[in-house]
């Protein structure tokens, strides 16, 4: 199910599937992130809520894990875009395309869920230590 989530004036496209959510790291998401990490937290809360409303069961992803995955993809995408300006290699293009597509699923449907779950503890450090991207 495709839907849009409004977070403080930023309209972010979200695709909900039964065991996952899909976001695209586009200008709208990056602008929301630039204005504050709290926007990403609100987005993730809303995505989890919409998923539960639509499918009748919660998506088994901890909030902090989802936040860190979205931020991780966004940072990687931003860095890769800068690298592509220096040297437009096929490898950078491939990685930037992968970083741009944010697929978050529960552990049974997302092979790297364990990594994002483990990194979820970093949310507090990111939110306190960094104000702008």
Image (spheres, helix red, strand yellow):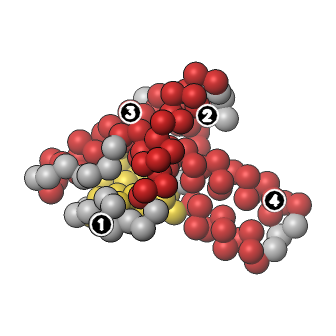
Horizontal placement of 58 versus 42: left or right?
left
Horizontal placement of 118 versus 79: left or right?
left
Mark 3, other Cα within 10 Å: few <14 / some 14–19 / many ≥20? some
Q: Could you tell me residue 16's position as x and y percent?
A: 29, 59
* Front in this rendered view, residue 120 or 103: 120
Q: Residue furthest left?
A: 56
Say above or below: 55 vs 122: below
Secondary structure found at label 2: helix
Q: Could you tell me residue 18's position as x and y percent?
A: 22, 63
Q: Could you tell me residue 62's position as x and y percent?
A: 33, 44
* Front in this rendered view, residue 75 or 4: 75
Dividing the picture into quarters, in which one does residue 1 lie?
bottom left
Instruction: Name the residue carrying label 2.
Output: 34
Say above or below: 26 vs 108: above
Do the CB atoms of the residues marked 4 and 2 lie less than 8 Å apart?
no
Indicate which disc residue 42 carries: 3
């Amino acid at each position: 199910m495709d839907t849009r989530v409004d977070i403080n004036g930023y309209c972010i496209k979200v695709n909900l599937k039964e065991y996952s959510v899909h976001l695209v790291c586009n200008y709208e998401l990056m602008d929301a992130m630039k204005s504050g990490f709290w926007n990403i937290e609100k987005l993730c809360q809303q995505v989890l809520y919409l998923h539960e409303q639509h499918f009748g069961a919660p998506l088994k992803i901890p909030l902090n894990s989802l936040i860190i995955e979205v931020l991780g993809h966004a940072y990687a995408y931003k860095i890769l875009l800068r690298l592509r300006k220096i040297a437009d290699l096929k490898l950078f293009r491939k990685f930037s395309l992968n970083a741009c597509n944010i697929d978050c699923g529960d552990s049974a449907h997302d092979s790297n869920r364990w990594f994002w779950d483990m990194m979820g503890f970093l949310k507090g450090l990111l939110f306190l230590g960094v104000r702008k991207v």
